[in-house]
Amino acid sequence: MDFFTYTIPKQGEIAGSTTAVQLPDRKCKGVIFSVRAGAVAKFYIGGEGVTVPDNATDQTSGLEIAAGQSTPLLPCTNLNLWWVIASANSDSLSYLLLT
């Protein structure tokens, strides 16, 4: 399967939650995550058990995506491999899938 060959992009949005949430079961070849420019909450993505960074050495702190930021294209086979947690129960994380 050629990573750079894809069909119609698919998109969605996940509401902010201060509890880690697994993303939905959607097959893909890659994903881009984004937080809208006016967002107050910061979002952290990672694997199961992702946490908000707390200035301690650990293996659970997620990758921060703040207001107005997007990730590069992240290769993956299913969106449900990702978990997300937010610094507040406001705003949302958007995603664009390449399938």
Image (cartoon, rainbow, N blue to C red):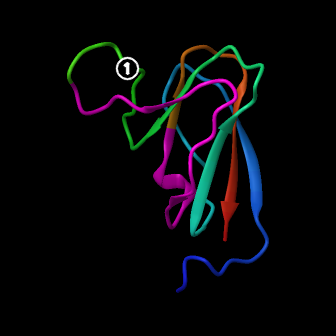
Q: Is residue 60 magenta?
A: yes
Going by the image, does 27 lie left or right of 76? right
Name above or below for residue 77 compared with residue 20.
below
Going by the image, does 35 lie left or right of 25? right
Residue in view at x 39 percent, y 26 percent: 51
Name the residue furthest left. Answer: 57
Residue 35: quarter of image = top right
Residue 17: quarter of image = top right
Residue 93: quarter of image = top right
Please state the horizontal and vertical placement of residue 20, each as a whole percent of the image: 48, 30
What amino acid type is highlighted by mark number 1?
Answer: Pro
Q: Secondary structure at mark 1?
A: loop
The secondary structure that dominates the magenta segment is loop
Q: Quadrant of the C terminus?
A: bottom right
Q: Range of the magenta residues?
A: 58-83
- In this view of the protein, which residue sits in the foreground, 63 or 90? 63
For label 1, count other residues whose C-alpha is less than 10 Å away and answer few (under 14), some (14-19) or many (20+): some
Residue in view at x 75 percent, y 25 percent: 37
Please state the horizontal and vertical placement of residue 82, each as a whole percent of the image: 49, 47
Please state the horizontal and vertical placement of residue 28, each as a whole percent of the image: 60, 67
Return the residue at label 1.
Answer: 53
Residue in view at x 76 percent, y 53 percent: 11
Residue in view at x 20 percent, y 22 percent: 57
- In this view of the protein, which residue sits in the foreground, 80 or 62? 62
